[in-house]
Amino acid sequence: MTDDLDRLLAAQALVPPQGFAQRVTALARTIPQGNSQPQPLRPWQWASLGVGAGLGAFLLGEFALFAFIAGAAH
Amino acid sequence: MDTDINKIAAGDHVAFSRIIEAHQGRIFGYLGRMGLDRATAEDIAQETFLRLWRSAWQFDAKLASPATWILTIARNLALTHLARPSRRVEIMDGAEPPDAACDRPRPDEALQTKQQRARLRTALERLAPADRSLLAASYIEDLGLAEIARLEGCTTGAVKVRLHRARARLREILEKDND
């Protein structure tokens, strides 16, 4: 019976239909890929971040200096 | 093969097609041995590969081989399908692709094969879905006990015990049907 079972189960296997791979590949062309991996920043993005941070720090320093001078004048 | 998965993650359709060609036989064989009909197996196989396409970037070669990973996706989809209470009636057509004329079995042989397939499918439906998966996986060539254990989420010892029980149960069902 064991042999019979093996034979039956072996015969139960299905084979892929003709053109299955091509059909699924064509379907995949219409489906966007998920990708939530963080992308590394490019050099110009780092530069832009640096400029932004520098400008922010400069404006904050300027504000603090004016506030100090104004406070001292009174 | 890992490289192909990386290429798929980068949107390479040629690599994707190559992976399907390499794994489709194994996936269809596995789904068929689980007792699924052709239409359901095709739906699940298609969804398996489309999931692979969508989430190839999640593949981690340290955790599993591409073959085991793809098989795990197919297994999960098949078990979800089998757990669905109102799944469609599986057609007992045993519809196989037409064979070459010279290989075509005689009508009485074809009928006998069809009946055997239907009998086995009915018997498989009486097994727990996880046991159907285990039985089907045990017939995949090149899939060792360790990989089956990884696929089924248990130890190799548990695989041996469950496999022995599932075979015994299936044999019992088939013998009862014969009486």
Image: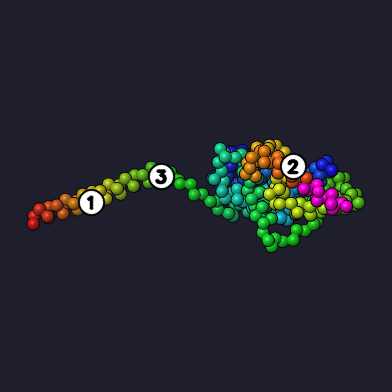
Identified by mark 1, the residue type is Leu
In the image, what residue occupies the spot 69% across and 62% down? Answer: B86
Q: Position of residue B113 (x, y in %)?
A: 85, 50
Q: Residues within 10 Å of mark 1 (few under 14, many from 20)?
A: few
Please give the range of residues in magenta: B169-179
Residue with the mark numbered 1: A60
- Residue situated in front as seen by the camera: B1 or B134: B134
Task: Tell me the CA gap for discs 3 and 2.
Answer: 54 Å
Q: Which mark is residue A41?
A: 3
For residue B45, side relative to residue B108 (left or right) = left
- Whether residue B16 is visible here, answered yes or no, is yes
In the image, what residue occupies the spot 70% across and 39% down? Answer: B160
Residue with the mark numbered 2: B164
Identified by mark 2, the residue type is His
User: Answer yes or no: do the residues labelled 3 and 2 have beta carbons within 8 Å?
Assistant: no
Q: Position of residue A22 (x, y in %)?
A: 67, 49
Q: Residues within 10 Å of mark 2 (few under 14, many from 20)?
A: few
Residue A48 within the segment the image draws in magenta: no
Identified by mark 3, the residue type is Leu
Q: Secondary structure at mark 2?
A: helix
- Residue situated in front as seen by the camera: B177 or B5: B177
- Whether residue B38 is visible here, answered yes or no, is no
The answer to whether residue B179 is above or below residue B5 is below
For residue B145, side relative to residue B59 (left or right) = right
